[in-house]
Amino acid sequence: MEKLTLIKVGGKIVEEPDTLLNLLSDFSMVPGHKVLVHGGGRSATRLAARLGIESKMINGRRVTDAEMLEVVTMVYGGLVNKNIVAGLQALGVNALGLTGADMNVLLSDKRPAGSVDYGFVGDIKRADGSVLAKLIGEGIVPVMAPLTHDGKGHMLNTNADTIAGETACSLASFFDVTLVYCFEKPGVLLQEDDDNSVIHEIDYCGFLDYVKNGIIQGGMIPKLENAFGAIRAGVREVLITRADCLCYPEKGTKIV
């Protein structure tokens, strides 16, 4: 089975010209088949402010009312996505910008209102990797924006980490998939304030021990739970690292 690397990067990296240029240069050198999933929240917040639309965040998650949905659709699916595609084309990478609505790749349900109503936010219920796999086999590099649809004509704002995980799982029956989550630290750390204390490999038993001993805590717990979920769904390995370490995966944390 041919190898495929799916890389998820946050909006902070792809929204600044210098970090975007470095990321695309490194991404272009990743060997073999590849997919890029990106964020773009800061750009959405800036454009919303210029349009006089208030950005509302609860527990770090964006509340997406009808006006904000228009903004994130424009920004994620347009401005940020196409800047990435154009940058990759300049480096000889034949990229294609997509949302989950394109080719019906990612179908979601609108999240029901509970104690918090996040508005037009999608929870993925089906990921179809078959058409993506055909494109990838033709040498095309998909660039996925953090948007899905509900099958009834409505776009939905959707967490980019979730999109990366679900897309990786949907491609696991077609390729030998490695999923790479890029964030601000070089990997999962033994000591939160020491970037040199990277744990280079974690299996599920080790993960449970680290949680029990308080070494892994907070937001890293659900990130790793998602990583192990991807492993169980057929993804060969998950890496957690910094974007500037894409060419040096051994420096990050490998989830096996």
Image: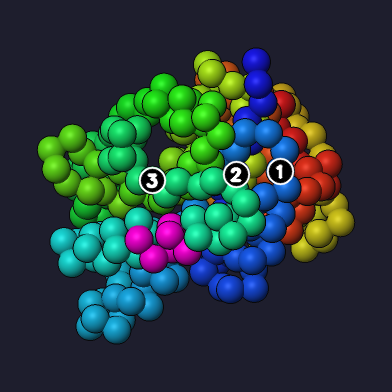
Disc 3: CA contacts within 10 A as few (<14), some (14-19) or many (>=20): many
Disc 2: CA contacts within 10 A as few (<14), some (14-19) or many (>=20): many
| Disc 1 residue type (three-letter) | Val
Placement of 33 over or under 170, stated as above or below: below
| Disc 3 residue type (three-letter) | Leu
Front one among 213 and 116? 116
Magenta part mainly helix, strand or loop? Answer: helix
Location of mark 3 (residue): 98
Q: Secondary structure at mark 1?
A: loop
Q: Secondary structure at mark 3?
A: strand
Task: Check contact, mark 2 vs mark 1: CB within 8 A.
Answer: yes
On the image, the x and y values in percent for residue 128 come to 37, 25
Front one among 97 and 236? 97
- CA separation, marks 2 and 3? 15 Å
Q: Which residues are magenta?
A: 78-84
215 to the left or right of 69 = right
Location of mark 2 (residue): 7
Residue 242 in sight here: no
Front one among 194 and 145? 145
**In the drawing, what numbered circle is on residue 231?**
none
| Disc 2 residue type (three-letter) | Ile
In magenta segment, residue 81: yes
On the image, the x and y values in percent for residue 7 come to 60, 44
